[in-house]
Amino acid sequence: MANNNRLILASASARRLELLAQIGVTPDIVDAPQIDESPHARELPRIYAARMAAAKLNAVAVRHDGAFVLAADTAVACGRRILPKAENAATARECLERLSGGRHRIYGGLIVRAPDGRRVARVVLTAVVFKRLSKAEIANYLDCGEWRGKAGGYAIQGRAARFVRRLNGSYSNVVGLPLYEVAQILGGLGWRA
């Protein structure tokens, strides 16, 4: 084992890299997993987020013995329903209409494997309350395009911030990675920046 302090990020998300940089964490390698991210029938959002994070870690960890591997997944949920990543305007509109005027939850699945094989996993919950959105607000948001590829059809760190009446929990979890928990887990497993 040459350098057992190497950190591998098992993600294709530029957003997660930016979030890690905020707390002074720079992965040595970004290795995007290729996995099926489809929810199972009747799968609860918390279980889905944990399962996806673990699947991403498992897909990448086999290629990086002797390194720390960090994987995460974000699920946006209305009740028991997992909202999709918005790949088109129709899906984004449906998500925003569902979120309008109500409360939804963000489940951030997080898992880290240490070089010695120890694993620590968490699911972080953040509750978000949206204002009631007018048709014009939804149309304007769809025109800006920042919803593309976003779970639940919005990016809280962008223009959708004006829709948020209240937030209870980790803001960075809503963006895509619960930073407090990442720092605590990495430090607890012995990783040093």
Image: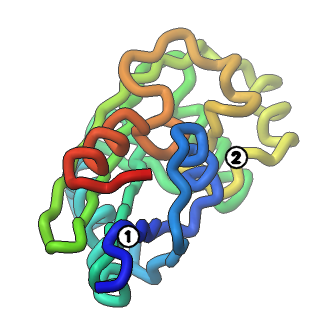
Side of 58 relative to 149 (left or right): left
Number of the label disc, if any, that sits on residue 38 = 1
The quadrant in which residue 97 appears is top right
Q: How is the image coloured?
A: rainbow
Work out whether residue 191 or residue 82 is closer to the camera in this orientation and state it. Answer: 191
Number of the label disc, if any, that sits on residue 95 = none
The quadrant in which residue 8 appears is bottom left
Q: Residues within 10 Å of mark 1 (few under 14, many from 20)?
A: few
Residue 184 picture location, percent across and down: 28, 39
In this view, 189 is above or below 33: above
Residue 98 picture location, percent across and down: 51, 33
For this orientation, the residue located farthest to the front is: 2
Q: Amino acid at mark 2?
A: Trp
For this orientation, the residue located farthest to the bottom is: 63
Instruction: Report the Cα–Cα distance between label 2 and label 1.
Output: 19 Å
**At 49% across and 34% down in the image, what residue appears?**
172
Side of 76 relative to 28 (left or right): left
**At 65% across and 61% down in the image, what residue appears?**
87
Residue 127 picture location, percent across and down: 37, 23
In this view, 139 is above or below 9: above
**At 65% across and 47% down in the image, what residue appears?**
92
In this view, 148 is above or below 77: below
Q: Amino acid at mark 1?
A: Ser
The quadrant in which residue 85 appears is bottom right
| Callout 1: SS | loop
Q: Which residue is mark 2?
A: 147
Residue 94 visible, this angle: no
Work out whether residue 135 or residue 163 is closer to the camera in this orientation and state it. Answer: 163
